[in-house]
Image: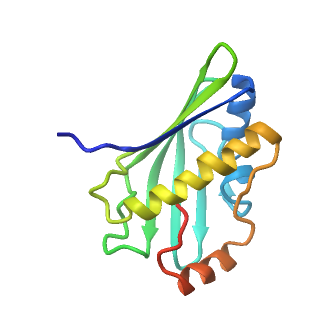
């Protein structure tokens, strides 16, 4: 039996263009404090919750209105023994138009149940994709981290309450 990568899918009555633009607006759904760029192949950006999670990610593929792919270049997750579990993994956003809705399929390739962070990372990605990114697509307003330091302090107080 092969291990399953983490994946989640949702559909909203919006155009593929709206989905694509929202995916590229990483500060609009993941974290307002990202550093770097995230719009075209070769762009590199960093997400950080101080003392908890830091990930440097490269945009490797952008197919307008269809797909965006990232590769995790370097990541550190302090909530697990192997803090480099995300290194070399791939994050895919696949956009598929339908008759009345457009679907987004998010897959973190390499994030499998064998990873110590799987449950916490699954919960985090589920929030950022199924809630924050979906809200950004549907309403124009996502729920990105606004103050990673406050999130780090909250995670320190409750170690198993974390986002990706």
Residue occupying the point 75% across, 30% down: 18
The quarter of the picture where the N terminus appears is top left
Is 120 placed left or right of 84 in the picture?
right
- Residue 72 rendering spot, x and y as whole percentages: 46, 52
Is 10 placed left or right of 132 in the picture?
left
- Residue 62 rendering spot, x and y as whole percentages: 58, 30
Which color scheme did the rendering employ for the protein? rainbow
Is 26 placed left or right of 160 in the picture?
right
User: How many numbered marks are there?
Assistant: 0
Q: Is residue 35 shown above or below 156? A: above
Q: Which sits in the foreground, 6 or 83?
A: 6
- Residue 107 rendering spot, x and y as whole percentages: 46, 40
Residue 92 in view in this figure: no
Q: Which sits in the foreground, 85 or 5?
A: 5
Considering every residue shown, the one lying at the far left of the view is 1
Image-quadrant location for residue 25:
top right
Residue 86 in view in this figure: yes
Residue occupying the point 73% across, 34% down: 21
- Residue 35 rendering spot, x and y as whole percentages: 67, 60
Q: Which sits in the foreground, 92 or 163?
A: 163
Residue occupying the point 44% across, 70% down: 77
Q: Is residue 67 shown above or below 48? A: above
Considering every residue shown, the one lying at the far right of the view is 140
Image-quadrant location for residue 114:
bottom left
Image-quadrant location for residue 31:
bottom right
Considering every residue shown, the one lying at the far bottom of the view is 157
């Amino acid at each position: 039996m092969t291990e399953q990568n983490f994946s989640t899918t949702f559909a909203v009555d919006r155009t593929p263009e709206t989905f694509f633009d929202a995916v590229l607006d990483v500060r609009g759904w993941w974290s307002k404090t990202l550093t770097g760029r995230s719009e075209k192949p070769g762009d590199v950006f960093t997400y950080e919750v101080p003392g908890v999670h830091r990930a440097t990610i490269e945009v490797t593929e952008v197919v307008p209105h269809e797909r965006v792919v990232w590769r995790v270049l370097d990541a550190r997750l302090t909530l697990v023994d192997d803090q480099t579990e995300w290194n070399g993994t791939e994050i895919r956003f696949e956009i598929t138009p339908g008759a009345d809705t457009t679907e987004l399929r998010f897959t973190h390739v390499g994030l499998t149940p064998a990873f110590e962070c799987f449950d916490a990372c699954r919960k985090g990605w589920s929030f950022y994709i199924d809630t924050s990114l979906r809200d950004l697509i549907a309403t124009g307003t996502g729920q990105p981290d606004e103050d990673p330091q406050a999130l780090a302090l909250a995670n320190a107080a409750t170690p198993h309450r974390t986002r990706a």
